[in-house]
Amino acid sequence: MSERIVAILFQLVIQVISAGSYAGIAGLIVLNSCGIPIPSELIMPFSGYLVFTGRFNLLLVALAGMVGCNIGSAIAYWIGAKGGRPLVMRYGKWVLMSAHDVDRMSWFFTKYGSIAILVGRLLPIVQTFVAFPAGIAKMPRVRFHIYTSAGSFIWYFCLAWVGLKLGVKWHTDPRLAEVFHRFHVGVEAVVLLLIVWFLWSHIKRGRKSVAE
């Protein structure tokens, strides 16, 4: 993600939260949890800074994020549950997703669903997209939302707490921007490696199937 895009997103976050208060936080997290890449790593630390200024309450910030996460995740879950295997069979080839992937996803969420959701909500990038495969696997809804609530509350509370502790340094310390830049570069490098592995494994499997 380029610095220009991050700057644009940051301005969007500032405007929405400044205008919408807790509802603005929840609304941004709804979009994030639907798979729209508005990073919670921008939303929640800025909200934490507003806790420092006295405008927000830390627990209410985390709760607003949790509510938004459940709403957005419910939408992504529904898309996965309704589309499921037919959606993958019809359109999966365009994103290199096969019926085998659906079977593997279903097995994984059947066996490790609760832990997968809880841990996924604590990971950058992953927490944005974890609801869709849970819907495809038809993970029990009540359990899905319980672990979504627990994981998202912890993640958002920690991010907001960071913003609170940074306090006035949010705008005055140039080292802060460098820290966040390095953090995003690191995350993007990991995601890129995962994408390369995903593409390589699926192309290799496709060639093997053709050869057989």
Image (tube, helix red, strand yellow):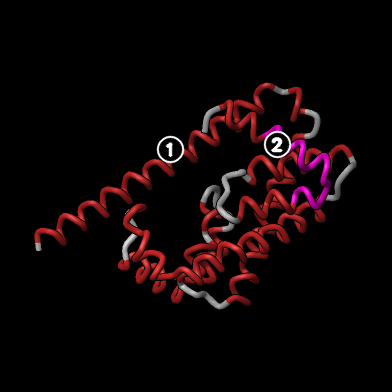
Instruction: From this view, report whether residue 163 is shown above or below residue 101.
Output: above
Amino acid type at circle 1 is Ala
136 sits to left or right of 202: right
88 sits to left or right of 57: left
Give the CA separation, mark 1 to mark 2: 25 Å
Q: Residue at x 68, y 34 (%)?
A: 10
Q: Nearer the viewer, residue 130 or 12?
A: 12
Amino acid type at circle 2 is Leu
Instruction: From this view, report whether residue 114 is shown above or below residue 163.
Output: below
Question: Residue 42's x, y, as percent?
Answer: 66, 40
Q: Nearer the viewer, residue 44 or 203?
A: 203
Structural crowding at the residue carrying mark 2, measured as other residues with C-alpha within 10 Å and reported as few (<14), some (14–19) or many (≥20): some
Q: Secondary structure at mark 1?
A: helix
Residue at far left of view:
211
Nearer the camera: disc 1 or disc 2? 2
Question: Is there CB contact under 8 Å for labels 1 and 2?
Answer: no
Question: Residue 60's x, y, as percent?
Answer: 82, 55
In the image, is residue 61 part of the stretch drawn in magenta?
A: no
In the image, is residue 11 part of the stretch drawn in magenta?
A: yes
Q: Which residues are magenta?
A: 10-25
Question: Residue 169's x, y, as percent?
Answer: 76, 28
Q: Nearer the viewer, residue 203 or 54?
A: 203
Structural crowding at the residue carrying mark 1, measured as other residues with C-alpha within 10 Å and reported as few (<14), some (14–19) or many (≥20): few
Quarter of the image for the C terminus: give it: bottom left
Q: Which residue is mark 2?
A: 12
Q: Secondary structure at mark 2?
A: helix
Q: Which residue is mark 1?
A: 189
Disc number for residue 155: none
Q: Residue at x 26, y 53 (%)?
A: 201
Q: Residue at x 78, y 42 (%)?
A: 17
140 sits to left or right of 14: left
